[in-house]
Amino acid sequence: MAVTIKSAREIQLMMESGKILAEVLERLGEMIKPGISTLDIDREGARIIKSYNTIPSFLNYNGYPASICVSVNDQVVHGIPDQHRILEEGDIVSLDAGVIYKGYHSDAARTYPVGEISEEARLLIERTRQSFYEGIKFARAGNHLNDISTAIDDYISQFGYGIVRDLVGHGIGKNLHEDPQVPNFKQKRRGIRLQAGMTLAIEPMINAGRADVVWEDDDWTVCSEDGSLSAHYENTVLITDGDPVILTLPSIGGSVNG
């Protein structure tokens, strides 16, 4: 497993990449409302990314046709923006995006309410986000990768939700996907020992129902098999000897407690 340890220069570039991505997602979140199409979101996201003279990580990645993954309700990840998919009151929508700044990637995702949503949906979004923060309490040098996975699993399992197992987090840097894989569920092995300078995209994907997923005919869009709502929360995280640094928040170095 070729896990990369980033130099101070690389970390600085990834911080810049993450700061830009945080701004992109914040601005896209502000436009979420009933009546807009998922393609509207993608077009605006592409425009904002390019306004920073950065490149969308996802556009044409392994053939993916858009800059922003826009996944609605039971769509877990990789929803393809479509002018005919109109957001409606009560929907939830997950936006997953990345940018490349001077050769370095950042990757983050958020799930947003569309207007007034059900209590079930609100709790799913809130708990998925919190599971990320439970996980990164253990994202520090000297701990093992499975410490992160186990913390996410322990937190989510109490609610009876399904933790998606077919898709996991990952290392990130010069490449969008690097070693190691970062599962959101506990493993039998402890996994690698975390070292300062590692950068990880930690991304719980949680279904309100069962964990099982299916791929739609477009070979990209992943949905919960039972049609239950799904939420996604992701940040690019720097491992240090102390508290982890979240690179994809508007204020880098903010609280790791959420």
Image (cartoon, grey):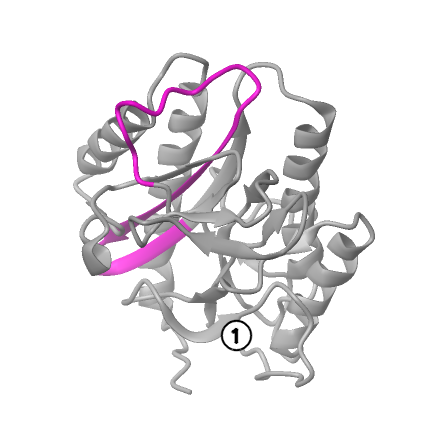
Query: Quick one: 188 or 245, which is closer to the camera?
Result: 188
Q: Residue at x 32, y 27 (%)?
A: 41
User: Quadrant location of residue 106?
Assistant: bottom left
Label 1 crowd (10 A; few <14 / some 14-19 / many >=20): some
Query: Quick one: 206 or 127, which is closer to the camera?
Result: 206
Instruction: Give coordinates of residue 81: x percent, y percent.
Output: 30, 34
What is the span of residues highlighted in magenta in the rendered image? 80-107
Horizontal arrangement in the rendering, residue 251 relative to residue 151 (left or right): left
Query: Quick one: 254 or 22, which is closer to the camera?
Result: 22
Is 77 within the magenta? no
Q: Residue at x 23, y 51 (%)?
A: 64
Which corner quadrant holds the C terminus?
top right
Horizontal arrangement in the rendering, residue 20 relative to residue 76 (left or right): left
- Judge whether residue 168 can be spotted in this image: yes
Instruction: Give coordinates of residue 141: x percent, y percent.
Output: 61, 75
At label 1, which amino acid type do we have?
A: Ala
User: The residue tagged with tag 1: helix, strand or loop?
Assistant: loop
Residue at the disc numbered 1: 196
- Judge whether residue 258 can be spotted in this image: no
User: Quadrant location of residue 136?
Assistant: bottom right
Q: Residue at x 45, y 15 (%)?
A: 33
The correct choice, above or below, for 196 with respect to 230 in the image is: below
Q: Give the farthest residue toward the right.
A: 158
Horizontal arrangement in the rendering, residue 56 relative to residue 78 (left or right): left
The correct choice, above or below, for 160 with respect to 51 in the image is: below
